[in-house]
Amino acid sequence: MKSKIFVGTVLFTLLLTYTSEAQRRRKTPFEQYSTVNFGLGTSSYAGDLAPYRSPVNTIFKMMRWNVNASYTRHFTPHLAARLGLTWARLAGDDEFYNRGGKPFDGAYVRNLHFRNDAKELSLVGIFKLRGDGRSPNRRAKFSPYLFGGLALLAHNPKAKTPDSPAFDNKWVSLQPLGTEGQGQPGYAKPYSLVTYAIPLGLGFTWKVNDQWNIGVEGGFRFTGSDYLDDASGFFPNSDVLKNDLARAMSNRTLEPIAARTGRDRTETVRRIVYPNDASIDPFAAPLNGWGEGDFRGNPVRKDAYMLSSITVSYILPSKIKCPPIR
């Protein structure tokens, strides 16, 4: 009985508070305002070359950068919408991520790497946990918020060619090569370089003065593509690939030198593939388990990336005051 009375009292108090707040808002309507925002931060990729199973390594080991700009419209004390543009570099490398064969020795043998300069156009809704006052200069001093929305993502994965006389160790685009047989008879069509992403995250803003905020934000982007890293399915029949460059970039298990880092892979690959015979040259013949029909990536889970940013926001004047005409 006492618990029912307590719950009823709490609900009644909340109702009175909500009613009085609503009345106050009607008497003093919220003055909508806008901000322009600029930010710098970090980016991390999660996918076939940096699995979710090792989250600390995935987030921090190959962290790169992002720059962003956006426009935000604040409609109510708690709700806003933001249109943003972000340029983020994503990267992954089997040799660097799994150096010494750890944490995933099979991925070390696979020896893939990539970088991808992704361009994101996003529209997100923002819910401010602490509401603003009735005008921009009365906004909250410290305001945590949540955000979620939808983004259009343009990307183009690249990798370095092998460190060998036949190639010149330069960055090339991977999608036109069809490294998993894309575009060839019996294989899937080439993957798109445009996809969607779903941004979700949280942030904080601090009021510096009437015109400026600074903030910190972090969030995930869950994408509609499994090819931000150019790896998703299976090793193809090398004979169907377009040319020698496509074959070289498709299966990199027999490269003694890691193309991006320049490190010798011989001893680690020998230990993983031939643990009982230290005399074998591990690159003398194709490796069992890394050939046609074997997994080159994981087609079950799509790629994702994480962005963090420190932002500076300028509050746009809500009204333009014209000088009096005399």
Image (cartoon, rainbow, N blue to C red):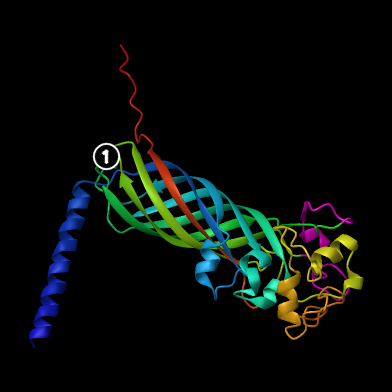
Seen as rendered, the residue at the extreme bottom is: 1
Residue name at image x 78 percent, y 84 percent: 277
Helix, strand or loop at label 1? It is: helix
In magenta stretch: residue 178: yes
One can see residue 295 in this view:
no
Q: Main secondary structure of the magenta part?
A: loop
Question: Is 238 or 1 nearer to us in this picture?
Answer: 238
Q: Position of residue 58 (x, y in %)?
A: 55, 67
In-image side of 155 versus 165 (left or right): left
In-image side of 190 versus 303 (left or right): right
Question: Is 249 or 101 nearer to us in this picture?
Answer: 101
Tag 1 residue: 137
Q: Considering the image in quadrants, where does the N terminus appear?
A: bottom left
The amino acid marked with disc number 1 is Asn
Q: Quadrant of residue 194?
A: bottom right
Q: Considering the image in quadrants, where does the C terminus appear?
A: top left
In magenta stretch: residue 58: no
Residues packed near mark 1 inside 10 Å, few (<14), some (14 to 19) or many (20 plus): some
Q: Which residues are magenta?
A: 165-190
Residue name at image x 19 percent, y 48 percent: 27
- Residue 219 vs 39, above or below: the answer is below
Q: Position of residue 169 (x, y in %)?
A: 79, 53
Residue name at image x 12 percent, y 84 percent: 4
Q: Position of residue 150 (x, y in %)?
A: 53, 60
Q: Position of residue 242 (x, y in %)?
A: 90, 64
One can see residue 268 in this view:
yes
Question: Is 325 or 230 nearer to us in this picture?
Answer: 230
Seen as rendered, the residue at the extreme front is: 279
Count how many numbered circles sit on residues in the image: 1
